[in-house]
C-alpha cells in the first residue's frame, strides 16, 4: 500500500475549473473520504489519481512515484465505480480474473488469487454467474473482489454504495471498513453522503466548487467546521445559521436577531472586536437548541416532524429565518403554530465572518 | 381479494373499485364476468391490429400466395396462348437449372464480398470516429453521408469513376483492360465496391450507436485493470458490440440478396452473366423473357433462401452474441 499525494493540482475542462489548486495527502493505509455535493470536483480528483483525467497543473504522487506521465494501467491502483462497471459478458470468475489476465499472471496463480478474493467477499457460490444474474449488493462485492485481487497500491472508490438500498448500504458500509482494516489498504473514497463520510473515514476532505474546504477527522470537522459551507454541509439536520449585525451590549458585544440580542461570550466578542466585524453568522447545531421559557430568541413553531426516536421542531424566528430544534421524543412536543423561546448553551455557538464565511476562533 | 378469472392486469386494476361487489358474487359468476371482459379485450385487440393486418394482407400476404400459385403455371412461349398447369414440375425444373445455380452462386459471392467487408469497414470508421477529438463531428457527418445517397446516384458516381476514359483510374495512371465493369473477373468486385460504399453510411451509424451504448466506465475499468487499447477492443468492445454486429450481418445479408439497382444501371447482369444476381435474374425473366411462371418460382426461391439463411444465422451466430444486461 502507498500514500497518495496531490500537489497544487488544478483541472480545467475548457473554461470550467473542476479542481482548483488541490493539495492533499492520503496517508498510507488511511481511509480518506472526499466529500462534497455533486459537481464539487471530488470525482474528478479521484479520476486524476486513476489516470483517467490528466491534471492541467500540479502533480500527483502514488507512493514515491510521480504518476503524471504514467498510463492508468501502470499506476497499480484499483477503482470501484458507482455503476460497478462489471464486464457484462464475463462470468463473475472472469471478471475477478480480468486484472490478472491483463498482467499475464499464470493460470494457477490466477485461479488461486481469484478464489481468495471471492472467498474474502463471500462470492464462492456465484463464480459462474453473469453480472446480470446478480443483485446490486452482489455486483458491488464482485467489483470489490476485482479491485482487491491484484493487491493494488491504493483503492479508489467512486460512490460505490449509492446504488444500494438504504438497509444494505448501512451493512456494506461496515463491511467495507472491515475490509480496509483487514487489507491494511489505502482507500480514497468519494461520496456526497455525509453519513458515509462520517462513519467510514479516518479523515474526511470536504470539497466545494473544486476547492478543498477542510480536511480532518470526522469528529473534529463536525465540532469545528472551518467555514460556513462545511458547517451547513456536515450534520443532519444541518446546522442552524442565523445572520445578524454586531451591536454593543453592555461592556461586550451581541448579535442582533430581529428584536432580540444574543450576547457573545467574551473570547468571541474580543475576536469579533479585534477583527472589526460588523456582521456575523451564528451557527448552532439543532441538538444544542432547546425550547425553554427563559430562552433568548422568540420563535413560532411551523412544523413538527417526528422520527420515532426523536423529533425535529421547525421554527421561524421573528424575522422569518428558519431554525430547527432537535428534541428527544420523550420531551413534551410543542403545538404547531405555538410561540416558543429558543435557548442554547453559549459555548455551543459557532461564529462565522459574514463576508469571508470563515470560522471565527475565540481570542 | 382473489381473482378467479384470468383477466389481464389492466382488467384487474380496473376492477379494484368494484372489488367489494365482486366479493359478494359466487366464483362462477365472477368467472363469467371476467370471461366476458376478456372477450371484449380480445375483440378490441383485433380491432386495433386490423388496419395493419389489412395493409399487410393486400401488399404482402396476397401477392406472396398469388406468386406461389403463379409458379404452378407454365407461361406459354408466345403471348396470347393460355397458361398451362404444371404443378411442382416448374419448381423443380427452374431450381435445378444451370442458370439458377449460377445466379445463386453469384448472389452468394456478392453477399460474401459485401457483407463482411462492409461491416469491418463500418466498424473501423466507427471506432475512429468514436474518439473524443476536436472536429470529429465533421468526420462523423462525412462517414454517414452515404446514407443520403440513393443506389442510382452511387451507381452513376462509380460508373463514372470506373469509366476507362474520364474515370479516376486513367487519371491515376491505371488503365485496366477490359474496363472493370466489362471484365468478367472483376465486374462483381466493381459492383461490390459500390455496394459497400453505398451501405457504409448505415453500417457506420449502426456501429457508432453500438459503440456509444457501451458505457465509458467499462473502458475505464478495463484501462485501470491493465488492459491496453488492443486488448480493450478485443475483450470489451467487440463482445459488447456483438448484438449490433449480429444485427448488421443479418440485415446486410438480406440486403445483399436483394441487390438490384446498381446491377441494373451498371452491368445488366453481364458481362457473360457474371453479375446476374437473383433479383436481376427475376427481373430479366419477367420483363425480357415475359416468363411470369418462372419469375414467380425464382421469387419464391429467393424468399426461401433469405428466410433459411436468416434462421441459420440466428441459430449459429446468436450463440456468440453477448446481450450483456
Image: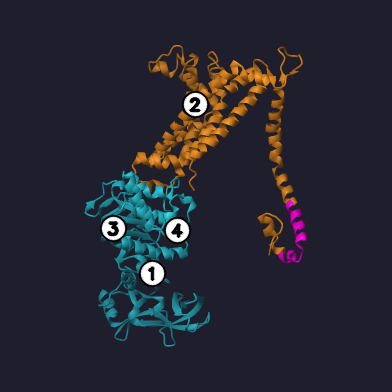
Chain colours: A cyan, B orange
Q: Which residues are magenta?
A: B19-38
> Is there a contact, CB below 8 Å, between mark 3 and mark 1?
no
* Residue placed under numbered mark 4 in the picture: A137
Q: CA distance from mark 4 to mark 1?
A: 31 Å
Label disc, if present, on residue B112 of the rendered structure: 2
Q: Earlier in the sequence, mark 3 or mark 1?
A: 3
First in sequence: mark 4 vs mark 1: 4
CA separation, marks 2 and 4? 47 Å
Residue shown at the point (65%, 26%) measured from the top left = B300
Q: Which residue has dot 1 on it?
A: A232
Q: Quadrant of residue B124?
A: top left
Q: Nearer the viewer, mark 2 or mark 1?
A: 2
Q: Nearer the viewer, mark 2 or mark 4?
A: 4
Q: Secondary structure at mark 4?
A: helix
- Of residues A82 and B172, which is closer to you in this image? A82
Q: Earlier in the sequence, mark 3 or mark 4?
A: 3
Instruction: Rate crowding at label 4 as few (under 14), some (14 to 19) or many (20 or more) other CA atoms within 10 Å.
Output: some
Q: What element does badge 2 sit on?
A: helix
Label 2 resides on the chain identified as B
Q: Where is residue A326 shown, x and y percent of the image? A: 44, 77
| Residue A317 among magenta residues | no
Q: Are marks 3 and 1 on the same chain?
A: yes
In 3D space, how far apart are the residues under numbered discs 3 and 1 (Cα atoms)?
A: 22 Å
Q: Are marks 3 and 2 on the same chain?
A: no
**Image x and y of residue B24, in percent:** 76, 66
Dot 3 corresponds to which residue?
A22
Q: Have a look at marks 2 and 1 and say if they share a chain.
A: no
- Distance from disc 2 to disc 1, alpha carbons, whole Å, reads 67 Å
Amino acid at each position: 500500500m502507498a500514500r497518495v499525494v496531490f500537489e497544487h493540482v488544478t483541472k480545467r475542462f475548457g473554461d470550467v475549473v473542476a479542481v482548483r489548486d488541490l493539495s492533499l495527502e492520503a496517508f498510507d493505509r488511511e481511509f480518506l473520504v472526499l466529500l462534497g455535493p455533486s459537481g464539487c470536483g471530488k470525482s474528478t480528483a479521484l479520476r486524476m489519481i486513476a489516470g483517467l483525467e490528466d491534471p492541467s497543473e500540479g502533480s500527483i504522487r502514488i507512493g514515491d512515484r510521480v504518476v503524471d506521465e504514467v498510463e492508468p494501467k501502470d499506476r497499480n491502483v484499483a477503482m470501484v465505480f458507482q455503476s460497478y462497471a462489471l464486464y457484462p459478458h464475463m462470468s463473475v470468475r472472469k471478471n475477478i480474473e480480468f486484472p490478472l489476465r491483463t498482467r499475464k499472471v499464470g493460470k494457477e496463480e490466477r485461479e488461486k488469487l481469484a478464489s481468495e478474493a471471492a472467498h474474502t467477499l463471500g462470492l464462492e457460490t456465484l463464480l459462474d454467474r453473469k453480472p446480470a444474474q446478480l443483485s446490486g449488493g452482489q455486483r458491488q462485492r464482485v467489483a470489490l473482489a476485482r479491485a482487491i485481487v491484484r493487491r493494488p497500491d491504493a483503492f479508489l472508490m467512486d460512490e460505490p454504495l449509492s446504488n444500494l438500498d438504504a438497509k444494505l448500504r448501512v451493512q456494506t458500509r461496515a463491511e467495507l471498513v472491515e475490509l480496509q482494516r483487514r487489507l491494511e489498504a489505502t482507500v480514497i473514497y468519494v461520496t456526497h453522503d455525509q453519513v458515509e463520510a462520517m462513519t467510514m473515514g479516518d479523515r474526511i476532505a470536504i470539497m466545494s466548487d473544486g476547492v478543498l474546504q477542510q480536511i480532518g477527522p470526522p469528529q473534529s470537522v463536525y465540532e469545528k467546521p472551518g467555514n460556513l459551507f462545511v458547517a451547513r454541509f456536515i450534520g443532519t439536520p444541518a446546522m442552524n445559521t442565523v445572520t445578524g449585525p454586531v451591536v454593543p451590549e453592555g461592556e461586550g458585544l451581541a448579535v442582533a436577531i430581529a428584536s432580540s440580542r444574543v450576547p457573545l461570550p467574551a473570547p468571541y466578542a474580543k475576536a469579533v472586536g479585534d477583527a472589526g466585524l460588523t456582521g456575523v453568522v451564528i451557527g448552532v447545531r439543532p441538538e444544542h437548541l432547546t425550547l425553554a421559557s427563559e430562552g433568548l430568541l422568540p420563535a413560532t413553531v411551523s412544523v413538527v416532524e417526528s422520527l420515532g426516536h426523536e423529533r425535529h421542531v421547525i421554527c421561524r424566528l421573528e424575522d422569518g429565518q428558519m431554525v430547527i430544534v432537535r428534541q428527544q421524543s420523550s420531551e413534551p412536543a410543542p403545538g404547531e403554530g405555538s410561540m416558543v423561546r429558543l435557548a442554547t448553551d453559549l459555548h455551543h455557538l459557532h461564529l462565522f465572518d459574514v463576508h469571508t464565511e470563515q470560522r471565527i476562533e475565540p481570542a | 381479494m382473489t381473482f378467479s378469472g384470468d383477466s389481464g392486469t389492466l382488467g384487474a386494476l380496473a376492477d379494484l373499485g368494484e372489488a367489494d361487489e365482486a366479493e359478494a358474487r359466487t366464483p362462477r359468476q365472477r368467472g363469467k364476468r371476467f370471461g366476458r371482459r376478456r372477450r371484449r379485450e380480445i375483440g378490441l385487440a383485433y380491432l386495433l391490429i386490423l388496419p395493419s393486418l389489412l395493409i399487410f394482407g393486400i401488399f404482402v400476404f396476397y401477392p406472396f400466395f398469388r406468386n406461389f400459385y403463379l409458379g404452378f403455371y407454365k407461361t406459354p412461349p408466345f403471348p396470347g396462348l393460355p397458361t398451362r398447369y404444371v404443378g411442382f414440375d416448374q419448381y423443380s425444373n427452374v431450381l435445378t437449372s444451370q442458370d439458377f445455380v449460377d445466379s445463386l452462386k453469384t448472389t452468394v459471392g456478392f453477399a460474401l464480398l459485401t457483407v463482411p467487408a462492409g461491416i469491418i469497414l463500418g466498424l473501423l470508421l466507427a471506432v475512429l470516429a468514436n474518439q473524443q477529438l476536436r472536429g470529429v463531428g465533421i468526420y462523423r457527418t462525412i462517414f454517414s453521408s452515404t446514407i443520403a445517397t440513393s443506389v442510382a446516384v452511387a451507381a452513376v458516381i462509380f460508373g463514372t469513376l470506373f469509366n476507362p476514359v474520364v474515370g479516376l483510374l486513367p487519371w491515376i495512371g491505371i488503365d485496366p483492360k477490359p474496363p472493370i465493369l466489362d471484365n468478367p473477373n472483376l465486374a462483381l468486385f466493381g459492383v461490390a465496391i459500390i455496394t459497400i460504399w453505398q451501405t457504409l453510411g448505415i453500417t457506420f451509424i449502426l456501429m457508432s450507436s453500438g459503440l456509444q451504448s457501451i458505457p465509458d466506465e467499462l473502458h475505464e475499468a478495463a484501462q485501470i485493470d491493465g488492459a491496453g487499447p488492443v486488448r480493450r477492443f478485443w475483450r470489451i468492445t467487440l463482445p459488447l458490440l456483438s448484438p449490433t454486429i449480429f444485427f448488421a450481418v443479418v440485415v446486410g445479408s438480406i440486403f445483399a440478396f436483394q441487390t438490384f439497382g446498381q446491377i441494373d444501371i451498371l452491368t445488366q447482369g453481364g458481362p457473360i452473366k457474371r453479375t446476374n444476381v437473383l433479383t436481376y435474374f427475376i427481373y430479366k425473366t419477367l420483363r425480357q423473357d415475359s416468363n411470369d411462371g418462372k419469375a414467380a418460382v425464382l421469387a419464391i426461391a429467393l424468399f426461401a433462401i433469405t428466410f433459411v439463411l436468416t434462421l441459420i444465422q440466428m441459430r449459429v451466430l446468436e450463440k456468440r452474441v453477448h446481450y450483456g444486461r
